Amino acid sequence: SQQGEEDPQALSIQEGENATMNCSYKTSINNLQWYRQNSGRGLVHLILIRSNEREKHSGRLRVTLDTSKKSSSLLITASRAADTASYFCAMRPTNFGNEKLTFGTGTRLTIIP
Amino acid sequence: EPEVTQTPSHQVTQMGQEVILRCVPISNHLYFYWYRQILGQKVEFLVSFYNNEISEKSEIFDDQFSVERPDGSNFTLKIRSTKLEDSAMYFCASEGTGGAGTQYFGPGTRLLVL
């Protein structure tokens, strides 16, 4: 698989339910970041988790990181219609001087009111 | 809250024309980036810029592309002779500390090459 694959590609749930999105990657990372993108709009940073962290919370968001499995998950609890968007993971490599983010393929989340 | 801004929001140009996309990064940030997203595809890295020079560039960033920080606030991406396949959303990002920080993205410029 390519660096930064997410599953599912698309997810539809009822408002109030929890949404879980997964991200897998291939190379070692310094950190992994999650972004949200509303249709045709900019990228909004949600949360950053470092390679030495296993779990991080921010409001209704919970991110986990398993470096042994090279995977991360984003959980949105008590979903709202406004959470409808595409969600991307982005990997930051470990080697110094390589600052670019490598983005995943994204999960399109639809919250049904 | 400080944010990255980009102008224009939309640009339509003819193939072969030059375009300049403009970005104002967050004021105390030191690292600057351009990414692009072709419709329906992944966000792809183009170039990173630090200390007034390119620190890394992708294979997409060929001789038709250039970046500049002409003054203390603006960061520009120039495409010298646009091609149809340059049609995409172009995002600028900035970061305060290199290598481990959060990259903050602007709202993007949607470029359409006809």
Image (cartoon, rainbow, N blue to C red):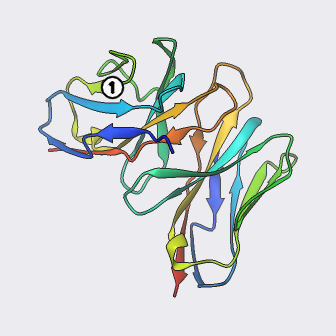
State whether residue B54 is above or below residue B92: above
State whether residue B88 is above or below residue A58: above
Q: Find residue B19 and report its image quarter.
A: top left
Task: Tell me the residue at 81%/40% (across/down).
Answer: A51
Is residue B44 something one can see in this rendering?
yes
Task: Tell me the residue at 24%/41% (across/down).
Answer: B8
Three-letter code, disc 1: Thr
Q: From the viewer's side, name the closer residue of B39 and A53.
A: A53
The local crowd at label 1, few if under 14, some if 14 to 19, many if 20 or more residues have their Cα within 10 Å, is: some
Residue A9 in the image, given as x and y percentages of width and height: 57, 66
Task: Tell me the residue at 42%/42% (across/down).
Answer: B106
Q: From the viewer's side, name the closer residue of A74 and B64.
A: A74
Mark 1 chain: B
Q: Is residue B77 left or right of residue A20?
A: left
State whether residue A19 is above or below residue B88: below
Task: Tell me the residue at 32%/15% (across/down).
Answer: B70
Residue A85 in the image, given as x and y percentages of width and height: 50, 66
Disc 1: which residue = B76
Residue B11 in the image, given as x and y percentages of width and height: 20, 43
Q: Quadrant of the C terminus of chain B?
A: top left
State whether residue B51 is above or below residue B7: above
Is residue A27 something one can see in this rendering?
no
Residue A13 in the image, given as x and y percentages of width and height: 60, 83
Residue at the outermost top position: B52
